Amino acid sequence: MARIFITGSADGLGHLAAKQLVKEGHNVVLHARNEQRAEEALDKVPGAETVLIADLTNMGETKQLAADVNAFGSFDAVIHNAGVYRASGEEIVAVNTLAPYILTSLINKPKRLIYLSSQNQAYGRANLVKLASDLSRISYSDSKLHDLMLALTVARMWPSVCSNAVDPGWVPTKMGGSGAPDDLTKGYQTQVWLATSNDPEALVSGHYFYHKEQFNYNPEANEIAKQDELLKICEDLTGIPFPYH
Ligand SMILES: NC(=O)c1ccc[n+]([C@@H]2O[C@H](COP(=O)([O-])OP(=O)(O)OC[C@H]3O[C@@H](n4cnc5c(N)ncnc54)[C@H](OP(=O)(O)O)[C@@H]3O)[C@@H](O)[C@H]2O)c1
């Protein structure tokens, strides 16, 4: 039995992954943006251990969330799932790029880390000059490339941790919309598998998965100089040094 923390688990893929993990007998800690969403999250997954609250657009709340996670106990896996799509560049950066950076840096190292990326990473650019100077110019696709780069960087920096990124497919959640063509169940199964399975295929690090298979991705994500620059910009924007060891 594992203990897993999932960001953005009041709805969509985070909620579905939480429900599945609880069904499989794991301990799950949920996360929601405010009290009302937290109550709703816990009502929908009554077997969860608890729900922690933070609006990820608020950096202070995100930092406090990491402290709350650490105070709750140690975790086998963290799924960085919360995300926004139709939002300003500033909100996209806060929720999709900086919150995973902050939580990765401040939460005590789990054994496994899973970052929700997207097929859209293929159309994104790291756009590091804009990230450092004008957040309004960062797109959803750029931020999903950042998530992938973060997963790969953490895999490189922390060899004892399995750190991977996932494309869940274009699936019918609030974000994906009702007409999304991909399989909703397969949209959360890969995260659940990476968080808990002892299959050798799930115990790898530094990969990008779609439906439990490793996939190719935007080659920009592999550029070490850009990975290092992304960490440095995240450090500057958040005031949190990355714990290299
Ligand atoms: N659905 C797709 O087709 C698709 C495709 C590729 C990648 N993804 C990725 O998969 C992940 C999950 O997406 P989804 O489809 O499940 O989206 P969703 O249904 O919109 O759910 C997103 C979750 O993130 C939470 N969230 C958003 N902003 C937040 C904030 N400021 N503070 C705290 N929580 C916040 C939401 O809370 P509320 O419910 O309170 O808003 C919700 O629980 C995202 O990272 C997304 O980029 C999705």
Image (cartoon, grey):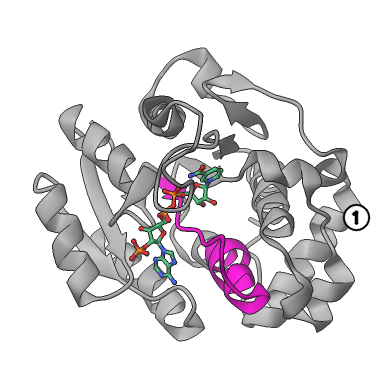
Query: Is 206 positioned to the left or the right of 186 in the image?
Result: right
Q: Which residue is drawn at 41% across and 42% down?
A: 178
Question: Residue 88: where, in percent of width, then height?
Answer: 62, 75
Q: In which quarter of the image is residue 197?
A: top left
Establish whether ligand 1 lies closer than 8 Å to the Cβ of label 1.
no
> Is 95 located above or below residue 245 in the figure?
below
Q: Magenta span has 87?
A: yes
Q: Which of the pair 52/73 is nearer the observer?
A: 52
Query: Is 151 positioned to the left or the right of 128 in the image?
Result: left
The outermost residue toward the top is 200
Q: Tell me which amino acid carries mark 1.
A: Ala
Q: Residue at x 39, y 76 (%)?
A: 55
Residue labelled with disc 1: 225
Residue 152 can be seen in this image: no
Query: Is 199 positioned to the left or the right of 99 in the image?
Result: left
Judged from the image, the secondary structure of the residue bearing numbered disc 1 is helix
Query: Ligand 1 lies in which image quarter?
Result: bottom left
Question: Residue 90: where, in percent of width, then height?
Answer: 64, 78
Q: Residue at x 78, y 70 (%)?
A: 232
> Is 99 located above or below residue 119 in the figure?
below
**Magenta extent:** 78-101
Q: Which residue is drawn at 67% across and 35% down?
A: 206
Question: Residue 225: where, in percent of width, then height?
Answer: 90, 55
